[in-house]
Image (cartoon, rainbow, N blue to C red):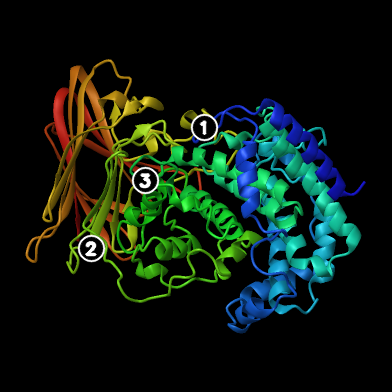
Amino acid sequence: MTSKSIIKKTFIALAGYICLVMPLYAQRIMVVEPPDIDRVKEIAVLLPEKPKGFGDPVQVRGRWDSLYTTGAFLRLINEADSISSVPFPELTEAIYMSYYKGKDSETSKRFIMKRRMLLAKMIWAECLTNRGTYMPAIIHALRSIVNTRTWTFPAEDREKTNWEGKRYTIGLSSSAYGSDMAQALYLLDSKLPGDLKEQIKTALYQRIFRPVLHAVNTGNVNNEFRSLKDIGNHNPVELANVLGAAFAVLEDKQQRAVFAAIAEKYSVNYFESYLDDGYCTEGIGYYSYGFTHYVFLRELLWQATHGKIDLFQRPKVAKMARFAPAMEIINSVYPAISDCEQYIKPWHQLMYYLNKNNDLGLSAYSRLSTDIEQPSLCWMMFFFPNAASAYPDSDNSFKSLPVRDYFNDAGVLTVRPLAGSLFNMGATLKGGNNAEQHNHNDLGSYSIVVGDELITGDVGLATYTPKYFTKERYDLFKTTSSYGHNVPLINGIQQFAGKDAVARIIKTGFSDQQDEFAMDLASAYKADDLKKLVRTFTYNRGSKHTPGYLRVRDDFCFSKNTAFETAIITRYGWRRVNENTIEIIGARAVLQATIHSSVPSFNISSEVIDEGPMPYTRIAIKLPATMNGHVSIEFKTK
């Protein structure tokens, strides 16, 4: 029996099941249930007769030849030359099992990702050049992948059911492989052997289509597709990959419509990871990853229905699109809030698309970059006509950064100098709560940029291990706990994780000259003696004759004498100038921090913490035990 007939029989059987048990449809629902047959029929009418992926098949040369002649993809082609000249790496049992030994989640993950990226680069190069040069290596890689026991990361296969072939599940890796394998069929159909095409279709049915259909039609009782109910970045990533695979290879548009209805419905859950003001609690890195795939999902439906289904019409999207621009501190530097690395930037292709589609006026994203963030085949969407490309490229109407951006629901404020000012220091000041997506216990933290250097502030993620994304992260890693952030300790007690730890904003006073932002942090500490803890930020933009500053002041009160400590976090060197002043010395800038306290004789000490990409220093400012008082740190450029 061919893969096509297997898929058809399965759809017929499941369609009967859907008709029997379909409940009432709700627009925004978290419960997994069978698709709405009426909605499936409505979508099917809009879909093309033939499957289509992103880009054009290799034999349709117009756009591919145009892209090739620009010369912009020479580096990718050179990489493909190197890849195709060496054996394709095989996923061994030893590599896969390295995860289960308890300390190594990266070896297997990176290896599995590498195999897919190697294949994708060769397919890009073949489509650009059309020489046939890469086809032997591509065919070998496709055969290797289709015969690999699993496409899943071990971290998504903790019971080894995928590896052992007992049950296939949808995850970040398996869905991405499904998307790229389907795209490979769509792009290179005319150059692939018939038996290989059938093998790939059968594998897609076994590892992607059947698990998805079984999940939605059984309430996901076997957890084949956990991210249907996920509110984070996994949701749009996996839905886009699954729908991309279905649209690229399934001949029957009724079958494609089932997957379109699934994607349309459950992608609503992704919006729950954004607050009503558009703030993404997952941080810049996961924003790029998740929202880029939401764009892919939007484009799949938009292109297939000629704009009749447009996921950008959902009201919250416009606010989400403005998240990254609003998080820029100054000079293209962003805070490393949550699990992302310092100096991270939003992905260029995403921002170019949003800039054009949403008229954001961002000069940095006025042209499409060919430096592809991830050379997955779905990235071809950006280089072919799409919903945003109709807008002309322009160097006009670019907007300068405002003096502040404030996410009221999130309690996150970014402050910047006046346009044209000699003052070149900006900051992000964070409230929020300690139950956010990819949460760090960081209420009251701040990041300061001078010029283009993040001199002090959140260092971002620690490292990837099997336990990093568990509840133990706050005990095992100082970087995720409040200890690794520039926030207070109360008698050695750190902030706790959970929704009850909230930074309650008690004052906002904004003007062109000065912004004041105060928050009550007392709820974040399980300290019996704590009666009051208020952190107040004052950002003064200075004038021609007076330098600006950022002052961070903590006012506290206890029921008995209690030790109070605050900290400055930096990856740069530092030195003590005098008893109450230190300097943090960047590569091009020096930030001076002057400490004032109601309690005399405070102590300054430091500790180097090495848990991730680079070590950093925690500079502790410790006050003698007292019942009440205040301490302030005033930051100025030197």
Q: CA distance from mark 1 to mark 2?
A: 50 Å
- Whole-percent x and y of residue 207? 77, 43
Q: N-terminal of the two: label 1 or label 2?
A: 1
Q: Residue at x 36, y 64 (%)?
A: 359
- Whole-percent x and y of residue 309? 53, 52
Q: N-terminal of the two: label 2 or label 3?
A: 3
Q: Amino acid at mark 2?
A: Asn
- Closer to viewer: mark 3 or mark 1: 1
Say which element carries label 3: loop
- Whole-percent x and y of residue 519? 22, 34
Q: Are marks 1 and 2 in contact (CB under 8 Å)?
A: no
| The furthest residue to the bottom | 69
Say whether residue 55 is visible: yes
Q: CA distance from mark 2 to mark 3?
A: 27 Å
Query: Image height check: is 376 above or below 430?
Result: below
Q: Residue at x 17, y 67 (%)?
A: 422
Quarter of image, res 425: bottom left
Q: Amino acid at mark 1?
A: Ala
Q: Residue at x 53, y 31 (%)?
A: 30
Q: Name the residue that disc number 2 marks.
A: 424
Is 331 positioned to the left or the right of 7 in the image? left
Q: Name the residue that disc number 3 marks.
A: 278
Q: CA distance from mark 3 to mark 1?
A: 23 Å
Q: Are marks 3 and 1 in contact (CB under 8 Å)?
A: no
Q: Quadrant of the C terminus?
A: bottom left
- Whole-percent x and y of residue 522? 26, 25
Say whether residue 459 is visible: no
Q: Name the residue that disc number 1 marks.
A: 26
